[in-house]
């Protein structure tokens, strides 16, 4: 009985310890960013300066280091990223760095659990340059995104008084069309899927005939103020102004019946007023 009790205490204590969310010197963080039609996630840890000299001290120049702390920093992208025309294919990769005084080398590796000591060069799929500049003081390493455009952005890393910027581009047209195709094949909430596709072709691609095809598919599945107003705007661009106004007025009536926000109702009303001038 004593042995059984001792075993239960040991097991219970082990489970309790493993279940604890313990404080870490370099807390874990995650950042997610949409760039065009691509979603990118970065998981990393945030070490602090803690009154140390970082670059050229704790982190030597010209030697490989972690792009963060603790476990390897991981980046995940649902579509390819392009760094000066060098392609990083969709997937998850570990990220390492070789800091320099003028520029950094950023390494992407297929081993997502790699360490500096276990790093396998044969699994490196891409090495790119990062721009280095002086920046205002940042105590805890911060990795994120800046310079957001439909087709491009930059990964940035801020720590101590150093900023590293890694610009990249995405193929938004190709990725958008792929996302639309995948969403249709998935078959969930197709009314919204078709309306979102129409919105893309209307707003971004400026392909009004294709937009019209998608919005009509949406209306077949479910008529609502959103897809009616979407169709009105498309028809307006296709030069049937009279029909566009009729659809917009119908959309306004539907928006009231379907309890749309006052802001959206005002948006429809203001558009109608603009078209009637």
Image: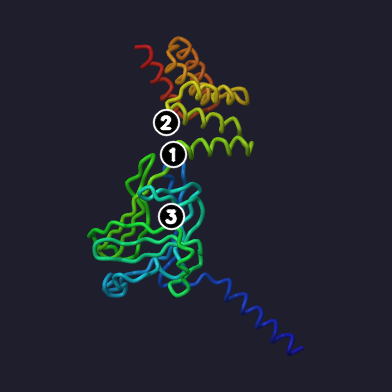
Categorize mark 2 by other alpha carbons within 10 Å: few (<14), some (14-19), many (20+).
Answer: few
Does residue 146 sit above or below 186 in this rendering? below
Q: How many residues crowd around disc 1 within 10 Å: few (fewer than 14), some, or many (20 or more)?
A: some
Helix, strand or loop for disc 3 = strand
Disc 1 to disc 2: CB gap under 8 Å? yes
| Residue 72 appears left or right of 274 | right
How much space separates mark 1 and mark 2, taking CA atoms? 10 Å
Q: Is residue 263 visible?
A: no
Residue visible at 49% across and 64% down in the picture: 123
Residue at the image position 48 percent from the left and 24 percent from the top:
230
Q: Who comes first in sequence, dot 1 or dot 3? A: 3
Q: Report the quarter where the N terminus lies.
A: bottom right
Query: Would residue 133 be found to the left or right of residue 30 on screen?
Result: left
Farthest residue toward the bottom? 2
Q: Distance between the residues labelled 1 and 3?
A: 20 Å
Q: Which mark identifies residue 172?
A: 1
Which quadrant of the figure has residue 10?
bottom right
Disc 2, SS: loop
The label on residue 31 is: 3
Is residue 226 positioned above or below 66 on the image?
Answer: above
Query: Quick check: 277 above or below 78?
Result: above
Pointer 2 residue: 204
Upstream in sequence: badge 2 or badge 3: 3
Depth check, mark 1 against mark 3: the one in front is 1
Residue at the image point whose x is 30% and y is 58% from the top:
164
Between 133 and 14, the residue placed more toward the observer is 133
């Amino acid at each position: 009985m004593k042995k059984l009790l001792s075993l239960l205490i040991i097991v219970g204590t082990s489970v309790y310890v493993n279940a604890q969310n313990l404080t870490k010197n370099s807390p874990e963080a995650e950042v997610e960013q949409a760039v065009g039609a691509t979603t990118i996630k970065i998981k990393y840890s945030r070490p602090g300066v803690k009154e140390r000299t970082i670059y050229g001290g704790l982190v030597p120049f010209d030697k490989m280091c972690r792009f963060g702390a603790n476990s390897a920093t991981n980046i995940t992208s649902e579509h390819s990223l392009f760094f000066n025309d060098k392609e990083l294919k969709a997937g998850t990769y570990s990220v390492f760095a070789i800091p320099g005084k003028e520029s950094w080398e950023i390494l992407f590796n297929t081993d997502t659990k790699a360490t500096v000591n276990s790093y396998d060069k044969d699994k490196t799929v891409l090495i790119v340059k990062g721009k280095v500049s002086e920046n205002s003081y940042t105590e805890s390493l911060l990795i994120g995104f800046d310079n957001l455009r439909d087709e491009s952005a930059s990964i940035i890393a801020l720590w101590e008084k150093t900023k590293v910027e890694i610009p990249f581009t995405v193929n938004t047209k190709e990725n958008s069309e792929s996302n639309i195709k995948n969403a249709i094949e998935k078959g969930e909430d197709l009314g919204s899927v078709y309306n979102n596709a129409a919105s893309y072709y209307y707003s971004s691609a400026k392909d009004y005939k294709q937009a019209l095809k998608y919005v009509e598919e949406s209306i077949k599945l479910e008529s609502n103020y959103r897809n009616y107003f979407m169709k009105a705007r498309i028809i307006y661009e296709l030069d049937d102004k009279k029909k566009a106004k009729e659809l917009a007025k119908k959309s306004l009536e539907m928006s009231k019946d379907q309890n749309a926000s006052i802001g959206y109702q005002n948006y429809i009303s203001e558009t109608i007023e603009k078209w009637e001038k």
